[in-house]
Image (tube, helix red, strand yellow):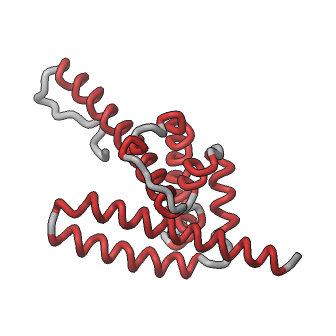
Amino acid sequence: MYGCFYSRRDEPESFRFLSVILRLFLVCYNFLAMIGLVKISLDFCDGKRPKISDLFTQYPLFFKYLIGMVLYGLIVFSGTLLLIIPGIIWSLKYWFFDYYIVDQGLGPVKSLKSSSAITKGIKMDLFLFLIITRTYEYRRCSLAFDRIVYNCSCIHGCSCFCLSQINDLISASELRYR
């Protein structure tokens, strides 16, 4: 994705155009697959039996997800420009925005706000969780390339479980204070 609009200078002009179109298609395909993976992870956490067709049936959420991803990227990038630590904090603060888009159909800004609200006070726990899961992911990927899909689904499943546990804690604390 990093070289999406980059083409070699020795390629014919028609090939460059076709290459850019193909790369854009692959980026869109990747976003649709990520939305579907989030949906499948949410279904697993809810105790439902997901279908493989769920991987590409979430296309109505594509533009919400795309805008949310751009906003998330801009927020984290601007935080990273402010000496890296704010970028890490903001990435943890808005980590669950895509789950809100897919699960509740919220818009990009509302999902970022919801993610901010539930991660209040638990960013260090999320940071440790992130370190553990990413270490596991990188170690597994270094052992065999075919494990990437397995690792990606495991990480999404773990993140989804983490989100459901946070929601359960918030619900329990709200009941306690009523």
Q: Which residue is the extreme one toward the top? A: 14
Quadrant including the C terminus: bottom right
- Residue 9: give x, y in percent of width and height: 16, 31
164 versus 43 height, above or below = below
**Is residue 12 something that shows in the picture?**
yes
Task: Write the residue at 62% across / 44% down.
Answer: 105
- Residue 37: give x, y in percent of width and height: 41, 52
173 versus 160 height, above or below = below
User: 36 or 94, which lies in front?
Assistant: 36
**Is residue 79 something that shows in the picture?**
no
- Residue 84: give x, y in percent of width and height: 48, 70
Q: Which residue is the extreme one toward the right? A: 178
Quadrant including the N terminus: top left
User: 131 or 83, which lies in front?
Assistant: 131
Task: Write the residue at 57% across / 65% down.
Answer: 90
38 versus 121 height, above or below = above
156 versus 28 height, above or below = below
Relative placement, left or right, of 175 versus 147 is right
Q: How many numbered circles are shown?
A: 0
Task: Write the residue at 19% across / 20% down.
Answer: 13
Relative placement, left or right, of 11 versus 25 is left
- Residue 75: give x, y in percent of width and height: 56, 56
User: 65 or 84, which lies in front?
Assistant: 65
Relative placement, left or right, of 73 versus 14 is right
